[in-house]
Image (spheres, rainbow, N blue to C red):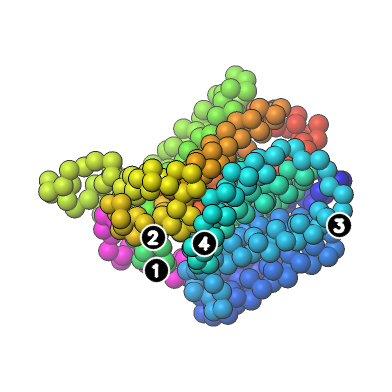
Amino acid sequence: MIPVHATKARPLNFVQVLLLGILGIVPYYSGYVLSAIWLGVFLLSFAGFTKNRMNWVWYGIAASPGLEVWSRMAKAPYIPDEIGKYYLAWCILLLLIHNIRRASAPPQHRIGDIVLLFLLPGSIVALAHFNYEQWVFNALGIFEICALLIFAARERWEIENFCRTLQFSLLSIVLMLIFLTIKSPNIFNIEYKLGANSQASGGFGSNQVSTILGAGVSVAVLLQLLHRPLFKYALLNYTLIAYLSLRGLLTFSRGGMIVAMVTILIALSPYIFANIRSAIKYSLIIVGIALAGLLVFKKANDISGNMLLYRYQGETYGTLSGKKEKNWDVVLTGRGRIASSDWLIFKDNVLFGAGPGGGKRLREDYGYHGSAAHTEATRLMSEHGIGGIIAFLCLLVFPFSWLRRQRIPQWKGIIAALFALSFLTTFHAAVRTNTSIVFYVLAAIPVLLLASEENKTKNAG
């Protein structure tokens, strides 16, 4: 297979920025526009397939997390909540036909096949209790990771295509951010409490909005490190990162912003050890990022009347008044009890688990109300049994073996950051959005770095 060639990953020009603003604003006044955008994404993917421009399909895949949550926020007409997963299924079909029709390169890894092998037994046994809604909500995402990894292993991208794909991911998040700003413009008049804040999240689930905003922060920083920012002027890029952080913090959903912070540190760490000059430069950059982050946090905390600080300290009204003991389950807002119930379900269903969606059905019988899973690791354990545990461990170990095959430390940092963004998101939002699916798969795509690009990366300090 010939490496995918893409248009150079250039910053947006003035006309494109103007169009971006219009696309973000208009769906607030008519949800049908967002429905039309989704239709356009499906059709463009098909057009890319027919023209043998499969990079168009991958652009859509990368943009799907932001588009998915945006359409949920806007309640776009005729668009189902799980449109993101349906779109990935459409792309998988296109990729399958494309790979059948054209000779593909040998796979660079087999992680998708391996994980799929361990997930199948529990899923087949659970067909006796098949529930379409629960299968889509719980199981479709992990199977889509497997399928996309199988195709990703056969890709050969140039760095421009990789960066261009990341730019499309950030574009969809910026569109969602514009919509969020219009829907919840007056962040100073919101009543902030010690819990997730749907008012600051555009009236939608704060966990998912925070997840996407945090992903936007991470991708924007990675594009800066790759010298392919979204905007031409540095001030615009830095302002975008700061505003994404501010709005993410004000959702009061901590997972997305904590993941972004960890991701950035991972991406920057190889630059510290490149050479003395790079160590000094990037140490100062990390200090600058930390100070800027503290200023943004302070501003958000002032807006919330100090509630944000209490939230990140894991406080509740009960712990502040002394009526409730502060423990890990309180800090994690019940996720500890969900994990405990998943463990009990697993103990009674070791071989094949309770089946996709079975955890929610049985959780109430094991000490917790019928809540959906928040952590993919424990969901795989309870709903897929021993095969789910092995599948999770395979997904956990693969990034380390894949990183060992990359030659350039700074490039390893970029890939490790994407793996971390994906994996850590599963610990607070399971696979409720396409975020974990998309960024894990992008990190696993073989990228061919030309000698000039290698030198640029090595000498980044």
Q: Are marks 1 and 3 in contact (CB under 8 Å)?
A: no
Task: Measure how far apart labels 3 and 4 are at the Cα level.
Answer: 35 Å
Between 314 and 183, the one lying in front of the other is: 314
Query: Closest to the observer: 214 or 371?
Result: 371
Q: Main secondary structure of the magenta part?
A: loop
Q: Earlier in the sequence, mark 3 or mark 4?
A: 3
Q: What separation in Å lies between label 1 and label 3 (alpha carbons)?
A: 45 Å
Q: In the drawing, what numbered circle is on residue 128? A: 4
Give whichever of discs 1 and 4 has the lower sequence position. Answer: 4
Task: Estimate the spatial distance between the alpha carbons at disc 2 and disc 1, rounded to whole Å.
Answer: 27 Å
Callout in the foreground (2, 1): 2
Quick check: is 194 in the magenta stretch?
A: yes
Does residue 233 appear in this view? no
Q: Which residue is at a point 80% across and 35% down the rendered structure image?
A: 450
Asked whether 367 or 152 is in front, the reply is 367
Q: What residue span does the magenta drawing correspond to?
A: 176-195
Instruction: Check disc 3 and report the residue beneath it.
Output: 101
- The answer to which quarter of the image holds residue 168 is bottom right
- Coordinates of residue 242 in the picture (x, y in percent): 48, 50
Q: Residue at x 60, y 53 (%)?
A: 143
Q: Secondary structure at mark 3?
A: helix
Lower sequence index among marks 3 and 2: 3
Q: Which corner quadrant holds the C terminus?
A: top right
Q: Is residue 169 above or below residue 68?
A: above
Q: Identify the amino acid type marked 4.
A: Ala
Q: Nearer the viewer, mark 2 or mark 4?
A: 4
Q: Which callout, 3 or 4, points to the residue nearer the camera?
A: 4
User: Quick check: 298 left or right of 208?
Assistant: left
Q: Which residue is mark 1?
A: 203
